[in-house]
Amino acid sequence: MVRKYLPGRLVPMVLAALAPILAHTQDMDRPRPVTTQELWASFSVKGRPPVFLKDMLGDRYKRILLSGEVGYRSADNFFAGRQIYTDLGVRYKVNRWLAAGAEYRYAARISRADRQRTAMRLHLNRSWGRFDLDHRLIWQRNHLDRDRTRTLVRNRIRVAYDFRSWKLDPELSVEFFTRTDLPRGWTHIGTR
């Protein structure tokens, strides 16, 4: 009696055991994205304008923040550098929750043409209890070559929660990129 039902039950069990292997072999020819490892490192400073401008700026002196950054981005190999850049920026705090600013970047790129970037930004930041919400809007123009530019509008939305007496706080953010210098650019939105 056992022998009569064994082959009928054995076939489905063997097929169930082989299904992952068969599925894996079908997946082998599918193209995969190229992955790389890079190191991004930077050193930045922020501070108020020079003291000799304090009298001229008056009450606005405390609302202005200057920043500078020098960074290095490697290729797959740490010593095969891809880019060294310098950022200079200024930010003006309009009120408790709104800041406006400008930024300039010069990027010396190894084995490719150097690039420059200018940006104007608005930053809204509000807190409700333990929640922090912010929105960053950037208009960015990348100078690719002498005659070519690329213009983007970037929107970043961030939500964070501050746990009481805990060093690690959760944060969720998403950034949308919209290219505005092409007629079809407004319909193509990238995310990060």
Image: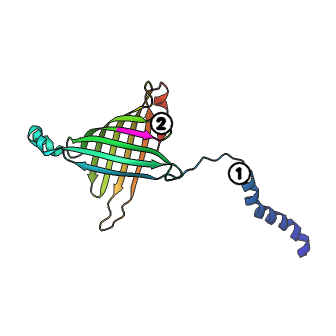
How far across and how far down the image is residue 125, in percent?
28, 47
Tag 2, which secondary structure?
strand
Side of 164 where 185 appears, left or right: right
- The magenta stretch is 105-109
Left or right? Give the position of 120 relative to 108.
left
- Residue 78, given in percent of the width and then of the height, sits at 49, 53
Question: CB of mark 1 within 8 Å of CB of mark 2?
Answer: no
- Magenta residues: mostly which secondary structure? strand
Provide the residue designation for mark 2. 189
Left or right side of 88 for 1:
right
Residue at (44, 34) in percent of width and height: 178
Q: Amino acid at mark 2?
A: Ile
The disc, 1 or 2, on the residue closer to the chain's N-terminal end is 1
Between 129 and 38, which is closer to the camera in this rendering? 38
Residue 3 location, quadrant: bottom right
Q: Residue at (26%, 39%) from the top-left corner?
A: 100
Say few, some or many: other residues with alpha carbon within 10 Å of mark 2 (under 14 / 14 to 19 / 20 or more).
few
Q: Residue at x 30, y 68 (%)?
A: 165
In the picture, the disc for residue 116 is none
Question: Which residue type carries mark 1?
Answer: Asp
- Is 6 placed above or below 54 here? below
In the rendered view, would you say 185 is above or below 71? above
Q: CA distance from mark 1 to mark 2?
A: 29 Å
Q: Is residue 106 magenta?
A: yes
At 44% across and 38% down in the image, what residue appears? 177
Is 82 magenta? The answer is no
The residue at which mark 1 appears reads as 27
Q: Quadrant of residue 130?
A: bottom left
